[in-house]
Image (cartoon, rainbow, N blue to C red):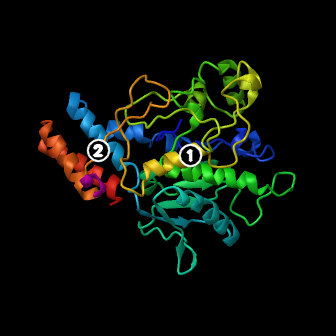
Amino acid sequence: MRFVRLAACSLPFLGALAPPALAQGSFGLPSCVSTLVSGPASAFKRFIPNDVKGRAELQMRGVVARSLTWRPGQTIRVCFKSGSRGAHERVIRIGREWMNYANIVFDFEENGAPRLCTGDGRDDIKVDFKDFQGWWSAYGTLSRQRDPSMNLQFFGVDTPRYSNGQPAPEVELRRTILHEFGHALGMMHEHQSPAAGCDQEINWEAAYKMGAQMGWDREKVHSQMGALTQIAELNVTEVDRKSIMHYSLPPEIFRLGRNSPCWIPDNDDLSAQDKNFIASMYPKSGAPVETTGVPPAGPAGALTRGAKPPAALNDREALVRQYAEMLKQAGIAADRIAQLTQEFRKTVLGQ
């Protein structure tokens, strides 16, 4: 499955994204909470007043969902808050792999060198390498509102090393960086797909015990391992166990261990479905970007539905105007329209 995603965190103790020598509880917890509360679900709730119902609500949800992805063909400015030149070049080389399939441009450089963050508000994705803060990224255009918007702990040196002094293999670094830039483009964790069925596979008592060792309560365990609630704005496709966005969760938390369909070995590369999905999200041909209309059930291979949006939706100012007009048509008070539209414009345009 592939879908535009909610929580944009990678957990250091989960095998697919962290070498065991780096993934020890003594390294502390990742900073996932701030990205969890800023995902698309909270944005939908924030921008859609409770008294907007029916068709008006569905139309407004479509506009809001579209605002949280980058525009096809957009140049996305990326800067670095810390780290060595070698670390920057590694992130640039790996992050750009998404450009082979998505119609976007990651602009990492200034005057021929990796761009350093200046805090002037012009940068879209701000990459940091703070130790003990986890591997995570904000979702899509919400990256503009976070500083930093992505963290790659321990990766900020030319040669990241395990706690035993051995250099981390390139495959481990590449896997994590690809995963986090997938989040920055709007992709979610594959194992949390509503279509994955992993909730039934997990031995939750074992998961709670593992979480407790990390200092997590049950709610936090569910936020990282449990299925996401199906909402219309998720572009849900068939589950892809080979996706770079799928955690290799510890087999001990599954009732059937390694025999569980939800346990997978590490995925090191973008899967064929990753490539196809991101190309459909950011098309080169002007094909529709699907954001709404996912049915509760349907035939295999036909879980994602969507209509081609009007051309004006590619104009972010037009998107803001359309949002304000929808609020007006829904009978929202003028002062509330002004407030919501101002907040929406800031989210859409980064202003």
Task: Indicate the secondary structure of the residue bearing disc 1.
Answer: helix
Q: Residue placed at 69% from the left, 43% from the top?
A: 267
Residue 330 is situated, as x and y percent measured from the top left of the image, at 15, 36
- Sequence order check: which comes first, mark 1 or mark 2? 2
Disc 1 marks a residue whose amino acid type is: Asp
Query: Which residue position holds label 2?
Result: 63
Instruction: Tell me the tag on residue 13.
Output: none
Q: Residue placed at 54% from the left, 69% from the top?
A: 108
Query: Which residue position holds label 1?
Result: 274
Q: How many marks?
A: 2
Q: Residue placed at 56% from the left, 46% from the top?
A: 274
In this rendering, the answer to whether 254 lies above or below 332 is above
Q: Quadrant of the N terminus?
A: top right
Main secondary structure type of the part rendered in magenta: helix
Residue 261 is situated, as x and y percent measured from the top left of the image, at 67, 25
Q: Disc 1 to disc 2, how far (Cα)? A: 24 Å
Based on the picture, tell me whether residue 314 belongs to the magenta stretch: yes
Between residue 89 and residue 291, name the one nearer to us: 291
Q: Which residues are magenta?
A: 311-315
Residue 195 makes an appearance in the image: yes
Quick one: label 1, few (<14), some, or many (20+) residues within 10 Å? many
Q: Residue placed at 58% from the left, 50% from the top?
A: 180
Q: Quadrant of the C terminus?
A: bottom left
Task: Indicate the secondary structure of the residue bearing disc 2.
Answer: helix
Between residue 40 and residue 106, name the one nearer to us: 106
Disc 2 marks a residue whose amino acid type is: Val
Would residue 124 be found to the left or right of residue 341 on screen? Answer: right
Would residue 336 be found to the left or right of residue 95 on screen? Answer: left
Residue found at the very far bottom of the displayed protein: 111
Residue 166 is situated, as x and y percent measured from the top left of the image, at 86, 56
